[in-house]
Amino acid sequence: QVQLVESGGGLVQPVGSLRLSCAASGTIFSIDAMGWYRQGPGKERELVAVISSGGATTYADSVKGRFTISRDNAKNTVSLQMNSLNPEDTAVYYCNANVRKYLVGRSYTYWGQGTQVTVSS
């Protein structure tokens, strides 16, 4: 099996910063795209940022210029540096990874358990 474990959430004041991390473990041959999604109160889950295995990144318009996604392929980790946070960023943040468990075969999507980020004064 594959597990994704997130860390780094918490309470932060507006304009503050937080860094989220996610580590994948288990039966892993390689990982294609990795990303972060979030679900705010009363809202649907939405894409925040995604990074390919080669390092290409995509961001939601609402976080461009404030958030930075990065990954360490050797450690199977992905991080999200969040700066200039505002109350609208309050949500549960989920890590996502498309994992290839073996050399041959398709990739499967896995999710972390989520970590709460609250932006409030």
Image (cartoon, grey):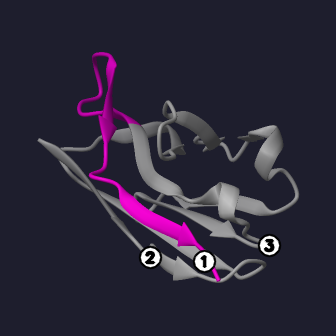
The C terminus - image quarter = bottom right
Callout 1 amino acid: Leu
Q: Position of residue 56 (x, y in %)?
A: 74, 41
2 sits to left or right of 94? left
Closer to the N terminus: mark 2 or mark 1? 2
Rendered residue at 81%/63% (across/down): 66
Element type at marker 1? strand
- Contact between labelled residues 3 and 1, with CB atoms less than 8 Å apart: no
Q: Quadrant of residue 28?
A: top left
Rendered residue at 60%/77% (across/down): 18
Callout 3 amino acid: Ser
Q: Which residue is mark 2?
A: 8
Q: Which residues are magenta?
A: 98-121
Q: Position of residue 48 (x, y in %)?
A: 63, 44
Callout 2 amino acid: Gly
Rendered residue at 38%/62% (across/down): 115
Closer to the N terminus: mark 1 or mark 3? 1
Element type at marker 2? loop
- Contact between labelled residues 1 and 2, with CB atoms less than 8 Å apart: yes
Asked if residue 86 can be seen in this view, the reply is: yes
Closer to the N terminus: mark 2 or mark 3? 2
Mark 2 or mark 3, which is nearer to you?
3
Q: Which residue is mark 3?
A: 84
Badge number at residue 18: 1
User: Is residue 103 located in the magenta-colored stretch of the structure?
Assistant: yes
Element type at marker 3? loop
Q: Nearer the viewer, residue 38 or 42?
A: 42
Q: Quadrant of residue 80?
A: bottom right
The Cα–Cα distance between marks 2 and 3, rounded to whole angstroms, is 16 Å
Above or below, 41 against 119 in this view is above
Badge number at residue 86: none
Say few, some or many: other residues with alpha carbon within 10 Å of mark 2 (under 14 / 14 to 19 / 20 or more): some
